[in-house]
Image: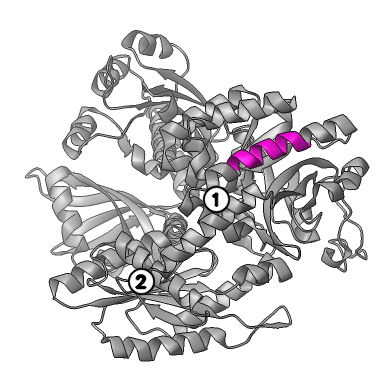
Amino acid sequence: MFDRLLNVLFVEDSVADTEIGLLSLEASGLKVLVRRVETESDYLLALRDPTDIVLSDHSMPAFDAKRALKLLREQGGDIPFIVVSGRIGESAAVDMMKAGANDYVRKDNLERLAPAVRRELGEAENRRRARLTSDKLQQQEQTLDTLMHNLPGMVYRLRRAGTAWHFDFASDGCKDLTGYDQEMLVGGDGLDLTKLLYGDAGQQDELLRQLEAEGQFTVEHQILCSNGDVKWIWHRGAAVKGPAGQVLYVEGFLADITAQKMGQTKLDYLAHHDVLTGLSNRTVFEEELARSLERVKRHFESGTLLFIDLDNFKEINDSWGHQSGDAVLRIIAGRLTACSRKGDIIARLGGDEFAIVMDDDQRTEDIARNVPRILEEIVRPLKVQGREITVSASIGIAVYPANGDDVTTLLRNADAAMYAAKQAGRNTFRFFAKKMNERAKSMVVMRNALHNALRREEFELHYQPEVRLSDRSILGLEALVRWKRAPDRLMTAEHFIPFAEDTGVVTAIDHWVMRSVCMQARDWNDAGVPFGRIAMNLSAHAFYDPKVVGLLETCINESGVDPGQLEIEITETTLMQDMIATRVTLEKIADMGVTLTLDDFGTGYSSLNYLRRFPIDRLKIDRDFIKEIPWDEEDVQICRAILALATSLRIEVVAEGIEDQEQAVFLHHAGCGTGQGYLFAMPQSAEDCVELLREGHCTIDPSRVAKTDEDGVPGGQFRL
């Protein structure tokens, strides 16, 4: 029945909530035609048209679910009614169920919506079939037998025998679900229910209490199959009572939900762990550090925070590529885990930063003996892709609560100690000291250096092409800022932008980037060099600066460039820090005709909500999800999901960080039209870009092409 188009009527005053509900249903494979109403008159008119199911918010300014349910039942028929609400309490939910609602789903738990819709539509269909055949008992029995044989689950009946409950009926699905066939479950005295339940020994008594009190139950629990496997099931049961109200039989249904539970477990894991290393992520780390801090304060003890930053790690990425850099991070994560003690909290905070929390009241001299062992473990040579690489680290140590009684202060002080370790020559550690001023001094030096760099025009832009994956034709460029600190030393943004943000110089750099990009676009326009569109990266500060829109408009007017030739990239983190201010700024920029791109998609909030709320034209899949495709099935599924989402929202997708042919081929066939990465071209100066732009396409680096393609044909060509 779910292959056809379902007519779903939403009684809902929020367009956004309706759209999210629609996406949830479609994501489960349902084909739906949605109508939304929020007044009684519109609701009555809508019910004149074919309606398969009603999904209703509990309360709205002009209407509510109880009234909607009453009107539906007064019209007769058997249309399922499910309450979908964000604020419904248990008492209100029970009232709605007593009034005749089929189910209720909270808006913060929409993964239940599609199963509930399927279930209630299925049950409504069963009731319809039963009514149609009520006058033909033989045909009814035949239909029931067919249904039982094909039902993906198990229908059963239990009879009570003293304190035990035995099966005296089980549908054909019992074998697939439990491993027991009908003769094993029902034969003889029938299998005792307690033999099937897994986990809490009191489950059977709890289910019986619910039956006696409410006449039914709906629960999720585990069962033990005949082969020893444990499965999660969705279990609904109803009581058949005797004249005195005692429970004689239980009739119910079991459905296997193990796959859904495993999927939720995987999502929970990803929400709490760093995808690359498997360590705890920053969110979990800060929560654990806060708990540790409370413990040591409560027991008048102390704990230790180690802030670990790899030395010169960016050089590995620049020299050998991000795949090598990622491999190094995974190895270092494993070494940190191996040399830590049971109970230590280890996390990757981001980039090449790690942290360890030890809350076992160590003395300073014990820490000073243990930390060098961690440094020795890190600095041991490691092999990556046939190369021997040596990595060192600088470690900052903060002892709590002496060096801070909250998470923010502790991290800041450990970070300051880490910078002191770097200034001491790297590959060493430093304890935080209240009089520590090296960090402040270095910030002053860097601030002056950045100001001088602007004055001396030491910044320059390099450009990396974005190409159409089908033919490698150049569609546009991304402008990347570089700092030429010396004739032979070119620093990438990762090395100085954090200092620029800390010292406030980043605003001036943003203004320089905007003007330089506009002027470069003008020069190429005047010279007849086709470049498509130039994307620029601005700091988070730019989107909170009320002057940025006016400055951008001035740059466009002075250069005479078409706003459609410009693009601004914004990260998810920036988008969410001050949503109101950022949205206002982005809407003004979009009104000018400038393209807006969401960069590093998938590494932050990845919310459907903000993709709809902000005027985003394009999104870039973060390189973390590109580097292992098509070999890593998890990354493959993530990329496919992002592409499907973008397609449904009519948002263009760019895959960044493409470094080899297999990645490009997969992405093209998966529906991604645009790519960027070392496979096509390295970032290069404006002068070096001219010839490439006039040619209009990129030549594949032979060293990054597989020896054979998917058909076994010798490589050397980029085949799509």
Relative vertical location of residue 37 with respect to residue 266 in this rendering, above or below: above
Residue at 14% across / 76% down in the picture? Answer: 300
Residues shaded magenta: 510-520
Give SS at disc 2: loop
Q: Is residue 237 left or right of residue 474?
A: left
**Of marks 1 and 2, the one in the foreground:** 2
**Image quadrant where residue 124 sits:** top left
Examine the rendering and report whether any part of residue 181 can be seen.
Answer: no
Q: Position of residue 19 (x, y in %)?
A: 47, 29
Q: Is residue 237 left or right of residue 611?
A: left
Residue at 74% across / 82% down in the picture? Answer: 386
In whole angstroms, how far apart are the C-alphas of marks 1 and 2? 38 Å
Disc 1 residue crowd, few under 14, some 14–19, many 20+, Cα 10 Å:
some
**Image quadrant where residue 374 sits:** bottom left
Amino acid type of the residue tagged 2 in the rendering? Met
Amino acid type of the residue tagged 1 in the rendering? Gly
**Image quadrant where residue 556 sits:** top right
Residue at 47% across / 59% down in the picture? Answer: 444
Whether 525 is among the magenta residues is no
**Residue that badge 2 annotates:** 436
Disc 2 residue crowd, few under 14, some 14–19, many 20+, Cα 10 Å:
some
**Residue that badge 1 annotates:** 602
Q: Is residue 574 left or right of residue 623?
A: left
Which sits in the foreground, 75 or 482?
482
Relative vertical location of residue 193 with respect to residue 666 in this rendering, above or below: below
Relative vertical location of residue 314 with respect to residue 271 in this rendering, above or below: below
